[in-house]
Amino acid sequence: MGVRIIGESLRNIPWQDKPGDYEGVVWRYDKNPLTRRNPTRSTARVFNSAVAPFRGRFVGVFRADHKDGKARLHVGWSDDGISWDIEDEVITWKDTDGKVYQPNYAYDPRVVKIEDTYYLTWCTDFYGPSIGVGLTKDFREFTRLENAFLPFNRNGVLFPRKINGKYVMLSRPSDAGHTPFGDIFLSESPDMIHWGRHRRVMGRGGSGWWQGLKIGAGPIPIETTEGWLLFYHGVVLTCNGYVYSCGAAILDINTPSRVLYRCRNYLLTPEKEYETVGFVPNVVFPCAALTDSDTGRIAIYYGSADTYVSLAFAKVDEVVEYVKENAEPFHEGEGR
Ligand code: BMA
């Protein structure tokens, strides 16, 4: 028996078989991108967005950059995970006392279902970027919790279940700007409010130059029989700016700050015009993944060129095997 996803089945996961002549383990949807410019009246572009299965359909939390240039979060709906109906209204947050509590800006959301609640994390304004946290049960009413971390931080990504009785979140401490450095850390919480027991998971670099500048967790980690499969983005600084690619690592199931394997080569890098040309050229930024435990299928949603939402596919056994066979020749994550 090969590698299996531990999780729910998802019969209607969006899917396309790998083209026969394709060599990689992550392949693109042939009708990418899924979204267009000016997708709603208020919005110039949606990208770096999250999706989840919801009551037989799909729900999305979209990073929507408005025509004033600021990033905000919008809900969207889809029957097939491909064609999206994005609401024009911004998500309204209320605090636990029911008072409206809107972020000044909000970007790069992640969505995860833990037990019967959907949690959202995003990059929020907390005297500079940090990690906002909130929850919803119906994607109509949203309750904002405490910000998880001190500024500055980005790419807060929750695990889909408690580990050793604690909520666990990956994040990437950063600076106030476009962060010319960055490693992935992990923190635990008993209550989704107080975060501690911080551990370093893995650093930028390794032998691959594509991840030499900074790295950040992508979709919610996928539980498999070999460990947590983590897709992440890696960034290189070229003479012309940053280039964002997608890689993967496998983390220990009970101690997820321990990296078992980490790929040396990227799995997806900007190649198509919708990835190389746009508001920010040369960006492939994975933010969400749907999985089907029956078939091992994975559908990865990624932002392309800060202009579109795009879709790619993978099979869990192929990705895990590839990461193991093409792993960095060293292990990380032992240190604090
Ligand atoms: C994210 C955000 C974006 C940026 C992007 C590349 O972390 O900071 O604003 O352009 O990386 O998609």
Image (spheres, grey):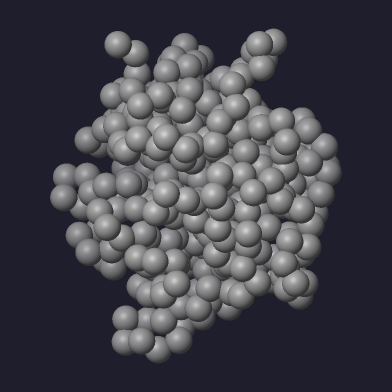
Q: Looking at the rendering, in which quadrant would you find the C terminus?
A: top left
x and y percent of residue 270 in the render? 73, 34
Q: How many marks?
A: 0
Whether residue 103 is visible to the viewer of this picture, yes or no, is yes
- Above or below 327: residue 146: below
Whether residue 334 is visible to the viewer of this picture, yes or no, is no
- Above or below 9: residue 63: below
- Above or below 305: residue 98: below
Q: Is residue 52 left or right of residue 97?
A: right
x and y percent of residue 216 in the render? 52, 45
Q: Looking at the rendering, in which quadrant would you find the N terminus?
A: top left
x and y percent of residue 186 in the render? 35, 48
Q: Is residue 163 left or right of residue 20?
A: left
- The residue positioned 37% from the left and 81% from the top of the image is 95
x and y percent of residue 167 in the render? 26, 53
Q: Is residue 44 left or right of residue 264?
A: right
- The residue positioned 35% from the left and 27% from the top of the image is 294
Q: Is residue 308 left or right of residue 54?
A: right
Between 152 and 41, the one nearer to me in the picture: 41
Quarter of the figure with residue 9: top left
Quarter of the figure with residue 304: top right
- The residue positioned 66% from the left and 30% from the top of the image is 28
- The residue positioned 63% from the left and 59% from the top of the image is 85
Between 83 and 22, the one nearer to me in the picture: 83
